[in-house]
Structure formats: structure tokens, C-alpha cells
Image (spheres, helix red, strand yellow):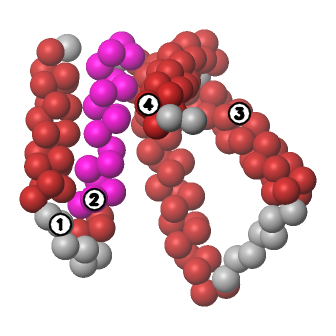
Amino acid sequence: MNQVYWGILSATSLGTADFFAGLTGRAIGYATALLWVYVVSCIGLTTYMFVAGHPMIFALSEQWSIVLFGVMNTVAMLMLYRALARGPLSVAAPIVAAHPVLVVIYAFALGSRLGTVQWLGIAFATLGAIMVARAA
């Protein structure tokens, strides 16, 4: 399948998911909505792992990173769901979509070298998020 089709499918899926997350968050509360997203995802992924025969192997020395990632992911998703439930989707979604900037900055803090393109990407994503926030 062409990359354009994958991109359109991804954008449509993410937009639809954000729309329903906002509706569900307003209807039953953002924390409850996220809890059920995690429950359904856990069941689906566990089922897939067993059906596909993928082993679940965890290195005991890396348990701290798994816990840290889980806590950070949960906090980030709670903030996303709260933003989608409280504000208009047209404001919350573009600001949240700038999250890769944090990933790149984290990689930089761990020692990665950023090129001109990465620095420009950070600047444009931050500028875009500010423009969307101010337009609201």
C-alpha cells in the first residue's frame, strides 16, 4: 500500500479517536474513559501476543524503565483526555500533536546530536502550537 494511503488512514484514525475521546470524556469522565481504553487495549494486545506466539520477555534490570514509561504514558494520556474533554478538539489536538518535540528534546538530553532539520522541526512545531493556542 502506498505511503499516502497509510498517512490518510492514520490521520483519519487519529482524528476519529480524538473526536470520540472528547465525547466519551465529557460523558463518563476522562479518567474513566482512559481506564476503559487501557483495559480494552490490554485485552486486545494480550490476545494478539498469545495468538501470534510472541513471547513476553522482560529483563529484570530494565523494570524501572518499564514502570517509568507506564507512569509517564498514563499521565500524558490523562492530560490528553482531559484536554479533549474540556476544550474544543480543534485547539487541543494540534497542541498535543506537538508532543514529538518532547521526545526529540529527551533524546538530545540523553546525548543525541540534533541537526538543523531537527532544530527547525522543534521551532516550527512549537510556533504552530503557540499559534493554535493563541487563536483560541
Residue found 85% across the figure and 56% down from its top: 52
Q: Quadrant of the C terminus?
A: top left
Cα distance between the residues tagged 2 and 4: 24 Å
Cα distance between the residues tagged 4 and 3: 31 Å
Residue 14 appears in the picture as rendered: no
**Three-letter amino acid code of the residue under disc 3:** Trp
Q: Quadrant of the N terminus?
A: top right
Q: Residues within 10 Å of mark 3 (few under 14, many from 20)?
A: few
Residue found 16% across the figure and 31% down from its top: 128
Q: Residues within 10 Å of mark 4 (few under 14, many from 20)?
A: few
According to the image, label 1 marks what residue? 114
Position above or below: 88 against 76 = above
Nearer-the-camera pick, 71 or 109: 109
Q: Quadrant of residue 125?
A: top left
Most frequent secondary structure within the magenta stretch: helix
* Residue 27 picture location, percent across and down: 60, 12
Position above or below: 105 against 91 = below
- Whether the residues at callouts 4 and 1 have beta carbons within 8 Å, the answer is no
- Whether the residues at callouts 2 and 4 have beta carbons within 8 Å, the answer is no
Residue sitting farthest toward the bottom: 61
Residues shaded magenta: 88-105
Q: Nearer the viewer, mark 2 or mark 3?
A: 2
Position above or below: 44 against 112 = above
According to the image, label 4 marks what residue? 4
**Which of the two discs, 2 and 4, labels the residue nearer the N terminus?**
4
Q: Quadrant of residue 7?
A: top left
* Residue 32 picture location, percent across and down: 65, 30
Q: Quadrant of residue 37?
A: top right
Position above or below: 46 against 14 = below
**Which of the two discs, 2 and 3, labels the residue nearer the N terminus?**
3
* Residue 75 picture location, percent across and down: 47, 47
